[in-house]
Image (tube, rainbow, N blue to C red):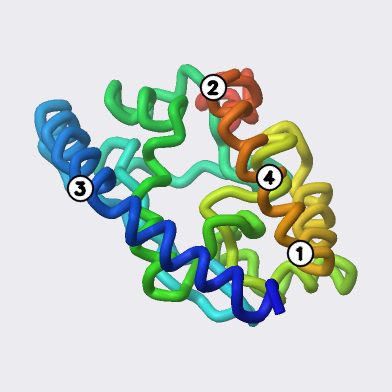
Amino acid sequence: MYKSYIKRLFDVVLCLIALPFFAIILIVVSILIKFDDRGPIIYKAARIGKNSTVFSMYKFRSMKVDAPNILNADGSTYNSKNDPRVTKTGRVLRETSIDEVPQILNILKGEMSIIGPRASGSGALGTYLEDEEPKMLVRPGLTGYTQAYFRNGLSVREKRLNDAWYAQNVTFRLDVKIFFKTIFTVLKGEGIYTNTEEVNEIVK
């Protein structure tokens, strides 16, 4: 009952309550982004949703316009503290996770949930092993088990397995624990970055 109906109801109600706060954040962040480099405010990324459908996930833009996409050897996104592709405002948005706030709109549209697996890039379609595929049984989340407890400290394989486990074990109690753990993790500010090496070392 919770997984099929009540979870979605909670998503809608909580996001509607959060909309006025989102509007305030949108105004402030929009001014900062435009002052920084005058580029677009919102970044749309093609992501894999429930049942492997592809949707556009919204984020506040944290990188410079037309920044190249750099991947690690395992296919994960390159992410370091000194990444020259990231704007000054973008660095703050990432470290506070404010860049994720526009996903409230994805939740209201039914493409995402407040709690769920991390949405993988659309390019990952077809790369999932059989024991990783259950991840797509539920909507991806604004936050989730892997993000709350490990942030960026796991390999792609480990993240997928954790997300698959979550999708098969969704409960109200688990979602509440993930919600409060997320707050603690963000405030603690650990595990934000995947890489320690510079971009030019990755590109070589």
Q: What amino acid is labelled 4 in the image?
A: Ile
169 left or right, relative to 8: right
Q: Which mark is residue 23?
A: 3
Q: Quadrant of the C terminus?
A: top right
Q: Secondary structure at mark 2?
A: helix
Q: Secondary structure at mark 3?
A: helix
Q: Secondary structure at mark 4?
A: helix
- Residue situated in front as seen by the camera: 133 or 137: 137
| Circle 2 residue | 187
Locate residue 150: give its quadrant.
Answer: top right
Locate residue 57: give its quadrant.
Answer: bottom left
| Circle 1 residue | 170
Earlier sequence position, callout 3 versus callout 4: 3
| Circle 4 residue | 178
Earlier sequence position, callout 4 versus callout 1: 1
Instruction: Relative to 76, say whether 96 is above or below.
Output: above
Earlier sequence position, callout 1 versus callout 3: 3
Where does the image place residue 144, in percent across and percent down from the top left? 65, 50
| Residue at image location 63% in from the left, 59% down from the top | 116
Where does the image place residue 93, in percent across and percent down from the top left? 36, 31
**Viewer can see residue 156:** yes
| Residue at image location 83% in from the left, 47% down from the top | 158
Earlier sequence position, callout 3 versus callout 2: 3
Q: Secondary structure at mark 1?
A: loop
